[in-house]
Image (tube, rainbow, N blue to C red):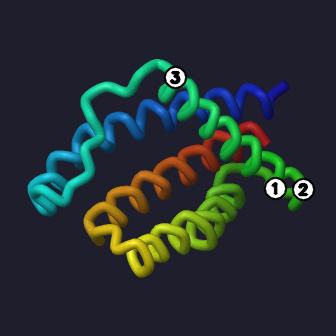
Amino acid sequence: MGSLISVVTASIAVFVLSSVYYALLTPVEKRLLGERAPDRGDRPPPLKILLELARGLVVAAVIAGLARYAGLTGVWPVVVLGLVLWAGFPAVLLTGSMMWERTPAATVALHAGDWLIKILVTSAIVGAWL
């Protein structure tokens, strides 16, 4: 039951943090990129909100499952796992989008920071329950 609570809590927490993060940093991205900045609109429709919460649930469940499988307990070991996962997946994928799809570096940095926050906060919450 504790794992389920931690997964749901982490999903909600990172949704809120990510929303604040993008609200604060999207204007910076727009200033840096001008017309090349992606248009994210104002408020996402309810379906996108639900899908984003579901994505957070998947990430939290994967981190919880890997941590449990590896026998990790406590916040710091799971946060280290999260940092390794961030370096191995979002960071690699995002730099690839910069190299191959010409995604602007400012956009890549924005998304990389968001994923770093999401994964580290999720890892800390999950680790606190393990």
Mark 1–mark 2 distance (CA, rounded to whole Å): 5 Å
Looking at the picture, how far across and down is residue 107, in whole percent?
A: 31, 61
* Residue ID for mark 3: 47
* Residue drawn at x 42%, y 62% as measured from the top left: 112
Q: Earlier in the sequence, mark 3 or mark 2?
A: 3
Answer with mark 1 or mark 3, whichever residue precedes in sequence. Answer: 3
Image point (70%, 32%), residue name:
6
Nearer the observer, 69 or 50: 50
The N terminus - image quarter? top right
Quadrant of the rendering where the C terminus is positioned: top right
Quarter of the rendering containing residue 8: top right
The residue shown at (34%, 74%) is: 102
Q: Label 2: which residue?
A: 69
Q: Nearer the viewer, residue 54 or 74?
A: 54
Residue flagged by tag 1: what amino acid is it? Leu
Which residue in the structure is indicated by mark 1?
66
**Is the C-beta separation of discs 3 and 2 under 8 Å?**
no
Horizontal side of residue 71 vs 116, given as left or right: right
Q: Is residue 128 above or below residue 6?
A: below
For the residues carrying marks 1 and 3, which lies nearer the camera in this image?
Answer: 3
Q: In the image shown, does 67 or 76 lie closer to the viewer? A: 67
Residue 29 position within the rendered picture, expressed as x and y whole percent measured from the top left: 19, 55
Q: Amino acid at mark 2?
A: Tyr
Q: Is residue 44 above or below residue 65?
A: above
Residue type at tag 3: Leu
Residue 70 image point, x, y percent: 87, 61
